[in-house]
């Protein structure tokens, strides 16, 4: 069975749903190969160089070695993350594109204080300023038409229903490992000898900024990011009103 045409999928929710059903029957590698062949370019991959990032980075750079890889450097990443990024860039030959907020950390704190300490409203303002705006600028400046991301349904309740392919803000967004679980990730990483993030050995299951990331305690994954107030920063989902219950 041939997949539905992306042009039809862009015009019809039914055709997009049919395309997602077709993608569900393909491997991650096949989804990526299909996307490079069928979806409009330029293509790009976003990454946080977090605990699980090496798998998506490996899959995409194996398929297209020079794909632009976007990192939003908030200025507050862990030192371990910066070193891990350097190691993976060298190991995989990553074509890294670093984007930063338009206001530096010292100036932001002088002007607004430590926004992440101001509850959900402060977090949303902080995340928009230091993450969402730089990412949107990166997508615009690089002319990205098809955006790859390593989101998975098993990561959180907010991601449990993500599709492999969606149309967002006029561009395609592909999640080639949306249906992978932890065992799939570990197996791929072992098979290809991918280095793990140093903080994973300290109990971190999700790594972002130093002041909004905590190691796993008592099995409560929701508490490992943003003080349990939200699981999303706004890069992939609208966080308006996304306060955890």
Image (tube, grey):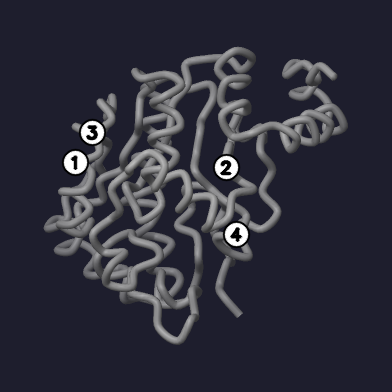
The residue identified by callout 3 is 91
Q: CA distance from mark 1 to mark 2?
A: 23 Å
Tag nearer the camera, 3 or 2? 3
Do the residues under discs 4 and 3 have CB atoms within 8 angstroms? Answer: no
Where on the picture, by quarter, is residue 57? top left
Q: Where residue 154 sits in the image (x, y, percent)?
A: 60, 59
Q: Where residue 198 sits in the image (x, y, percent)?
A: 23, 59
User: Which label's residue is closer to the chain start, 1 or 4?
Assistant: 1
The residue depicted at 77 percent of the width and 16 percent of the height is 5
Which mark identifies residue 87?
Answer: 1
User: Which label's residue is closer to the chain start, 4 or 3?
Assistant: 3
In this rendering, is residue 87 above or below 200? Answer: above
Crowding at dot 3, Cα within 10 Å, few <14 / some 14-19 / many 20+, comes out as few
Q: State left or right for residue 23 relative to residue 145.
A: right
Where on the picture, by quarter, is residue 167? top right
Q: What is the quadrant of the N terminus in the image?
A: top right
The residue identified by callout 4 is 154
Crowding at dot 1, Cα within 10 Å, few <14 / some 14-19 / many 20+, comes out as few
Q: CA distance from mark 3 to mark 2?
A: 21 Å
Q: CA distance from mark 1 to mark 4?
A: 27 Å
Where on the picture, by quarter, is residue 166? top right
Do the residues under discs 1 and 3 have CB atoms within 8 angstroms? Answer: yes
Crowding at dot 4, Cα within 10 Å, few <14 / some 14-19 / many 20+, comes out as some
């Amino acid at each position: 069975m041939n997949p539905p045409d992306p042009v039809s999928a862009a015009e019809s929710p039914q055709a997009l749903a049919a395309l997602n059903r077709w993608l569900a029957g393909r491997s991650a590698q096949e989804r990526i190969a299909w996307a490079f062949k069928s979806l409009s370019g330029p293509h790009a991959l976003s990454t946080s160089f977090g605990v699980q990032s090496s798998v998506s980075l490996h899959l995409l750079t194996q398929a297209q070695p020079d794909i632009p890889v976007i990192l939003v450097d908030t200025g507050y990443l862990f030192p371990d993350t910066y070193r891990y990024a350097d190691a993976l860039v060298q190991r995989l030959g990553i074509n890294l594109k670093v984007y930063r907020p338009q206001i530096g950390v010292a100036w932001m704190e002088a002007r607004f204080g430590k926004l992440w300490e101001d509850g959900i409203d402060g977090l949303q303002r902080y995340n928009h300023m230091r993450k969402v705006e730089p990412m949107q600028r990166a997508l615009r400046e690089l002319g990205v038409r098809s955006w790859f991301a390593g989101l998975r349904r098993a990561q959180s309740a907010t991601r449990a229903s993500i599709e492999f392919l969606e149309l967002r803000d006029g561009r395609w967004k592909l999640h080639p490992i949306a249906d992978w679980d932890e065992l799939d990730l570990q197996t791929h990483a072992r098979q290809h000898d991918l280095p793990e993030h140093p903080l994973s050995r300290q109990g971190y299951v999700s790594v972002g900024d130093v002041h909004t990331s905590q190691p796993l305690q008592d099995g409560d994954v929701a508490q490992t990011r943003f003080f349990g107030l939200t699981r999303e920063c706004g890069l992939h989902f609208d966080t308006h009103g996304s306060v955890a219950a």
